[in-house]
């Protein structure tokens, strides 16, 4: 009976020693951003019926980096069961929930058209188009007011609408670019 107990103790200690070595190897692979291999080694440790909150947490981190948030949340929750007081694990679970709930809203057709139109012209060309369209409206109005040439009001109205359309689209592009440049400047100051 004593021999059986010593063999059992020896087997358990060797098994835990090999699991510890696997854990260290998986951690080193994780540090090298080789998450796929790290996950395989972590799973191998789990197959040996060894578990710890750190093991589940590390598997969760690997899946989180691979943006597999459901699996990541699953392993974070297993880690939380073993270590219920950990605020870090709770924070990771809430990050997973945010990423799982984050769905990109469908793009409205006119917004996608506006973005395509804005990307077509440079900033300076866009400003010239905007100013030219506004100037053409004023010229048409002046021609109509001074009776130099009688232009139907529908053409003036249509030109004014097109001018306003270009002006608003282009001003939104300029505003976006200025906000982005402000963000870049504040980040470079920090």
Image: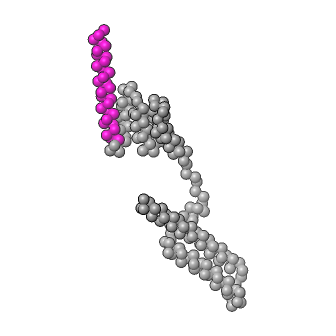
Residue 108 among those drawn in magenta = no
Residue lying at 33% horizontally and 33% vertically, measured from the top left: 23
**Looking at the picture, does residue 184 appear above or below residue 12?**
below
Percent position (x, y) of residue 73? 48, 38
Residue stretch in magenta: 1-30
Q: Can residue 19 be seen in this view?
A: yes
Residue 8 among those drawn in magenta = yes
Percent position (x, y) of residue 26? 33, 37
**Looking at the picture, does residue 129 appear above or below residue 189?**
below
Percent position (x, y) of residue 147? 71, 90
**Looking at the picture, does residue 137 appear above or below residue 10?**
below
Residue lying at 44% horizontally and 42% vertically, measured from the top left: 64
Residue lying at 57% horizontally and 75% vertically, measured from the top left: 130
**Residue lying farthest top?**
1
Task: Point out the image quarter for the C terminus.
Answer: bottom left
Task: Point out the image quarter for the N terminus.
Answer: top left
Percent position (x, y) of residue 105? 58, 52
């Amino acid at each position: 009976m004593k021999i059986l107990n010593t063999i059992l103790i020896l087997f358990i200690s060797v098994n835990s020693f090999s699991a510890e070595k696997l854990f260290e190897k998986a951690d080193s692979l994780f540090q090298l951003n080789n998450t796929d291999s790290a996950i395989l080694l972590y799973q191998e440790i789990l197959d040996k019926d060894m578990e710890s909150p750190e093991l589940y947490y590390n598997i969760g981190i690997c899946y989180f980096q691979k943006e597999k948030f459901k699996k990541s949340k699953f392993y974070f929750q297993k880690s939380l069961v073993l270590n219920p007081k950990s605020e870090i694990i709770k924070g990771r679970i809430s990050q997973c929930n945010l990423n799982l709930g984050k769905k990109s809203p469908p793009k409205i057709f006119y917004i996608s058209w506006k973005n395509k139109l804005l990307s077509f012209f440079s900033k300076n060309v866009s400003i010239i188009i905007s100013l030219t369209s506004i100037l053409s409206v004023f010229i048409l109005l002046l021609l109509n007011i001074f009776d130099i040439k009688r232009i139907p009001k529908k053409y003036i109205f249509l030109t004014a609408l097109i001018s306003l359309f270009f002006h608003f689209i282009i001003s939104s592009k300029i505003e976006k670019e200025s906000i982005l440049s402000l963000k870049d400047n504040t980040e470079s100051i920090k």
